[in-house]
Amino acid sequence: MPYNKGMIFDFLFKKKDDMIKEPIHVEPSSDGVDPSSKGSMKIEDVFSIAGRGTVVTGKVKGTIHINDTILITTKDGRRIKTVLGGIEAFRKTLDVAMDGDNCGLLLRNVARDEVDRDDMIEVV
């Protein structure tokens, strides 16, 4: 947002009641992905959690929900279709992963050695 010296002066020296309130303009995400679009994620790391299954981590683009059917495309061209069992970000369980979230996704019926770094996950 461009500014001028008058705006800064008003902010520093006028009372809050005297300032003109402008609507807040929210910029779209930096990569241009629509947050309501089907989600995708490039896998950054893979873990095997005892009693839970395989967890992959990465940065989400779009939106991913629990119980979404997802398609994993591996680097060697294999395609694995599975269901998303859970989403966790910073020790918080989530129902939805939004655009830009760094999170872990729990994959149902996928072994640790079936997926690897740089594989792609897409919501079907």
Image (cartoon, grey):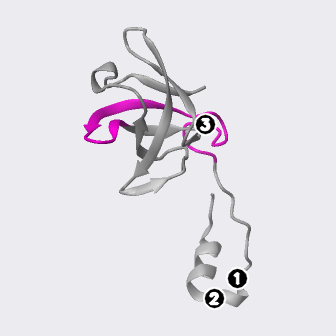
Which residue is tagged 2? Answer: 14
Quadrant of residue 49 within the rendered picture: top left
Measured in 3D between alpha carbons, the distance from the residue under mark 1 to the one under mark 2, in whole angstroms, is: 7 Å
* Proximity of marks 2 and 3: CB atoms separated by less than 8 Å: no
Looking at the image, the residue that sits furthest to the front is: 51
Name which residue type carries label 1.
Answer: Met
User: In which quarter of the view is residue 32 placed?
Assistant: top right
Locate residue 104 relative to residue 5 in the image: left or right.
left
Mark 1–mark 3 distance (CA, rounded to whole Å): 35 Å
On screen, 116 above or below 85?
A: above
Q: Which residues are magenta?
A: 28-56
Identify the residue at image location x=49%, y=53%: 94
Image coordinates for residue 31, horizontal then vertical, percent: 55, 37
Circle 1 residue: 19
Position of residue 85 relative to residue 70, above or below, is: below
Identified by mark 2, the residue type is: Lys
Q: Are marks 1 and 2 in contact (CB under 8 Å)?
A: yes
x, y percentage for residue 106? 41, 39
Amino acid at the residue labelled 3? Val
First in sequence: mark 2 vs mark 3 = 2
